[in-house]
Amino acid sequence: MGSGELEEEDPRSLRVRAFFGLPVPEPQREALAHFIAACAQLAPEFRWTPKANLHLTIRFVGGVERALVEAVADALGQRPLGALDIELGDVGTFGRGRVARVVWLGLRAGAEGADALAAQVEEECVRAGLPAESRPYQAHLTLARARPREGAGLPELAAMPRMEPWRADRLVLYSSRLTKAGAVYEAMRTLGLH
């Protein structure tokens, strides 16, 4: 390549694996980190979420053009998005029968607000040309995923600590980069909730 030629940008850098979520405040993260460490000892056949990655999922977008997901964030920034009060609830699982693929925490408080926010995000995603989510939204905070693809049996876990509720006043567009050590999340955009 001559000195006057420009290198072509890697087209993969124009794509991003993305999702919208609500960050978990530090005091709740800290309490969850201790709980997760205890659970990891009891259930090593699951990959437990690192403290830095804890969030409440609003909408997984997947691998898309960066400009597309940024346009969704721009559109959401023009809408009134309501803040919500969240209190984490009980442990649940996604899977079949006694085999769990995902271990999560539901909400004791804030599910209606999360549902409303998820509907607004879904509307903008569909308006931007993304396929509609095929499953109904269920507010949850992912704790772990089974190492075997088909899932694994989940033993009785450690007692869930009681955590203070919090006011969720930010919606974050995250990028997710998969590595051998696990997913690395990075905030791409933060939108205020009022």
Image (cartoon, rainbow, N blue to C red):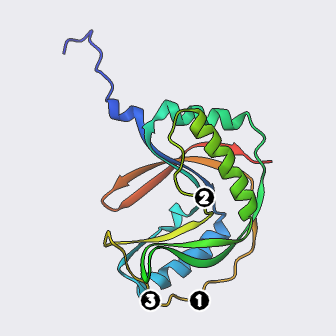
Disc marking residue 169: none
Q: Is residue 120 left or right of residue 174?
A: right
Q: Amino acid at mark 3?
A: Pro
Task: Determine which residue is flagged by label 3.
Answer: 155
Q: Mark 3 falls on what kind of element?
A: loop
Does residue 47 lie above or below 34 as drawn? above
> Which image quadrant: the N terminus?
top left
Which residue is drawn at the image coordinates 28% and 20% (left, top)? 7
Q: Which residue is more in the foreground, 189 or 84? A: 84
Q: Earlier in the sequence, mark 3 or mark 2?
A: 2
Q: Mark 1 falls on what kind of element?
A: loop
Q: Is residue 22 left or right of residue 110?
A: left
Which residue is drawn at the image coordinates 70% and 36% (left, top)? 77
Labels 2 & 1 near each other (Cβ < 8 A): no
Task: Determine which residue is flagged by label 2.
Answer: 137
Task: Determine which residue is flagged by label 1.
Answer: 159
Q: Amino acid at mark 2?
A: Tyr
Q: CA distance from mark 3 to mark 2?
A: 26 Å
Q: Which residue is more in the foreground, 114 or 169? A: 114
